[in-house]
Image: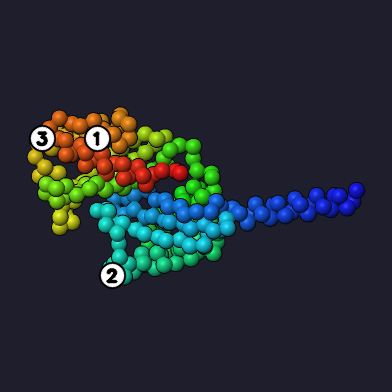
Amino acid sequence: MKRLSLVVTLVLVLSLSLVAQAAYVDGTYEAWSDASDKSIQSSKVFIEDGKIVAVILREYTDKHVEKDFSTYSWPQAGEAARTLGAQFVANQSAKADIVTGATGSSTGWIQATERALAKASGTAPATKYFDGTFLGRSETSSYGQYYKVVWVTLKDDKIVDYKVQRVLPDHTIQDPAEYGWPLEMARDAYKEAALTAEPGYVDVISGATGLTHQSNHAVRDALDKALTK
């Protein structure tokens, strides 16, 4: 009887050990932070044998242009990009120290990694999208060579807020007042429709077909970043 109890105990210990070692499902998982007015962060997490083996961190400007930390003028952000990934691997979690002078970047990468690990652990929310604000970018327009970036705020799989700006070929932001009355009106109409329509699928607004398609593409890009699975 004692021998049987010992065997059962060993089996339980081994089982618990294997569960502890295989905390995550093998694969590659990417997730994004909430977007601020200035940037958004991404984290791509690589899981092998149930463990975090590598993390790639990226950051994009408010114009959805990736930052090159070899030339970026704020060295603290580059330091955070280099050091936080190693901490995530060492800690086998999204725990890391905030880098002084790069609080926003550090916090964003921690949040993005938390979301990536939620996907890897099978404990992601039951909703299709994470709650939060996500930055999306449209394709470049053949007319004017501009593109759009949008901030889409989600709550319970619904769009609850929407903000947009047009980025010109020289990467400056076009003043909405320069759009002209019809386009400004269409932009407001798109926002109103986006809050009630199926996310990412606003029907074509009369007289603003290009605006509608480009806005929908940008919103869908933001929704892709918000996916929980």
Query: Label 1 sits on what residue type?
Result: Lys
Q: Is residue 141 above or below residue 205?
A: below
- Which percent across, then down, holds residue 217? 26, 42
Q: Quadrant of residue 49?
A: bottom right
Which residue in the rendered view is the most extreme toward the right?
A: 1
Q: Residue at x 72, y 55 (%)?
A: 14
The numbered mark at residue 71 is 2
Q: Does residue 175 show up?
A: no
Q: Is residue 146 above or below residue 54?
A: above
Q: Earlier in the sequence, mark 1 or mark 3?
A: 3
Q: Does residue 34 show up?
A: yes
Q: Is residue 121 above or below residue 84?
A: above
Q: Nearer the viewer, residue 185 or 217?
A: 217
- Which percent across, then down, holds residue 112? 43, 52
Pointer 1 local density, CA inside 10 Å: few below 14, some 14–19, many at least 20: some
Label 3 secondary element = helix
Q: Nearer the viewer, residue 86 or 206?
A: 206
Query: Label 3 sits on what residue type?
Result: Pro
Q: Residue at x 66, y 54 (%)?
A: 18
User: As drawn, is 78 to the left or to the right of 1?
Assistant: left
The residue where tag 3 is placed is 182
Q: Earlier in the sequence, mark 1 or mark 2?
A: 2
User: As drawn, is 158 to the left or to the right of 50?
Assistant: left
3D distance between C-alphas at marks 1 and 2: 36 Å
Label 2 secondary element = loop
The residue where tag 1 is placed is 191
Pointer 3 local density, CA inside 10 Å: few below 14, some 14–19, many at least 20: few
- Which percent across, then down, holds residue 119? 49, 47
Q: Residue at x 35, y 42 (%)?
A: 223
